[in-house]
Image (tube, helix red, strand yellow):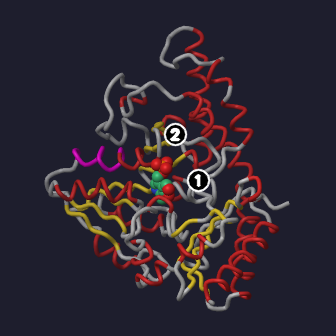
Amino acid sequence: MPTGDLQKGTPIYLDYLSTTPCDPEVVEVMLPFFSQHFANPASSHSLGRNAAGAVRTARKQIAALIDASEDEIVFTASATESNNLAISGLAPLAEAKRRRIVTTQVEHKSILEPLRSLDAKGFDIQYLPVDRQGRVLLEAAEEAIGETTFLVSMQAANNEIGTLQPVQQVAELAHKVGAIFHSDAVQAIGKVPFSVSQAGTDLVSLSGHKLYGPKGIGALYIRGGASNTPLEPIIRGGGQESGLRSGTSNVPAIVGLGHACELRRSRLLDDLHRVAQLRDEFEKGLTSRLPFVSVNGDPNNRLPGCSSIRFDGMRADELLANCPILAASLGSACTTGTTAPSYVLTAIGLSSDHAYSTIRFSFGRQTTSADLAIAINAIASAVGKLDQ
Ligand code: PLP
């Protein structure tokens, strides 16, 4: 059964990289924590201790998904906050002779914006280029990461084109010169296998709503815990989360994130194969109906559920406006509203026209073959209409 029904006001959802629906099992597990088990986990009475136990279970569930241990997980309100904490929290600890931060041209704004502010404070920020498929050039990384580098921050998977980055290799380069390695792994965790010990990451950001958990909850993995990698908190107060993130714990969301991670752990491989198959089916169907379209990104190393499609000679916004049955994104949803072409698409060498002709379709657990057949028909008829 296709999931979209315009008469009921529900288009076919092809925007899983923007956000995912909260799994009904996750919602069920969260509900008692709003009004029944509502106590503050910092309270010393038995109700507080019960809430603290639930938070501890969630920490373990998250740690298990990424091969970490529970004391290495710090809760935040979003991956945006985790990224800000990693970057702005490390910066004050940089030695005067190590002021270089190496990142990539295709990071999320929640990395680029704190870096822009550090740039203004005199840090030396280096932005690694990517190839036409969106992969960081290792030679460029080798050249940029040196004795003055104190932090390297590179995403695990790109949110616009789905390209997976060589995290392990770049982490090794960082460690060779004694630099800290952070990865924004928001789009990878829960979708492809990700192990912090295999990847060699020191800090990792993740988000609840990208893996069928609730919105408004994120986490930062810190190798060895807060005492091993000192960070300056960006939010100060009552000292929760080892002093790194003050504020009363959002227990329902924490419990939800934990359960979502547990579900991802058991379903990841099945979903990965099924969703990748759907993506391939969509791309094959679309390119056979519309031979002028092409796929952006790395065909071999990319997220299973991402299809960044270029409709050369057409405007993606007009095309999507003519497909009201579809809920998909222009480039990246997080930057929609801006009129500039996507900086990720520009970084892979696309012209502005090509960037403006790109739509990001993304697929997930609820996507069906029937949805995709409807989507392909809707796109093909919109192209026919706009071509006249
Ligand atoms: N990093 C990447 C790669 C993302 O795609 C996003 C959201 O789209 C974020 C960070 C921010 O995550 P959050 O919505 O939890 O702040």
Q: Quick check: is the Cβ at mark 1 less than 8 Å away from ligand 1?
A: yes
Question: Which residue is situated farthest in the front direction here?
Answer: 388
Residue beneath label 2, please?
A: 217
Image location (x, y in percent) of residue 197? 52, 53
Q: Does residue 6 lie above or below 360 as drawn?
A: above
Residue type of the residue flagged with mark 2 = Ile
Residue type of the residue flagged with mark 1 = Thr
Sequence order check, earlier mark of 1 and 2: 1
Magenta span covers which residues?
85-93
Q: Which mark is residue 19?
A: 1
Number of numbered discs on residues: 2
Q: Quadrant of the rendered structure where residue 130 is?
A: bottom left
Q: Does residue 108 lie above or below 248 as drawn?
A: below
Q: Is residue 374 magenta?
A: no
**Crowding at label 2, few (<14), some or many (≥20) Cα neighbours within 10 Å?**
many
Which residue occupies the foreground of this view, 5 or 172?
5
Q: Quadrant of the rendered structure where residue 187 is?
A: bottom right
Image location (x, y in percent) of residue 120? 17, 57
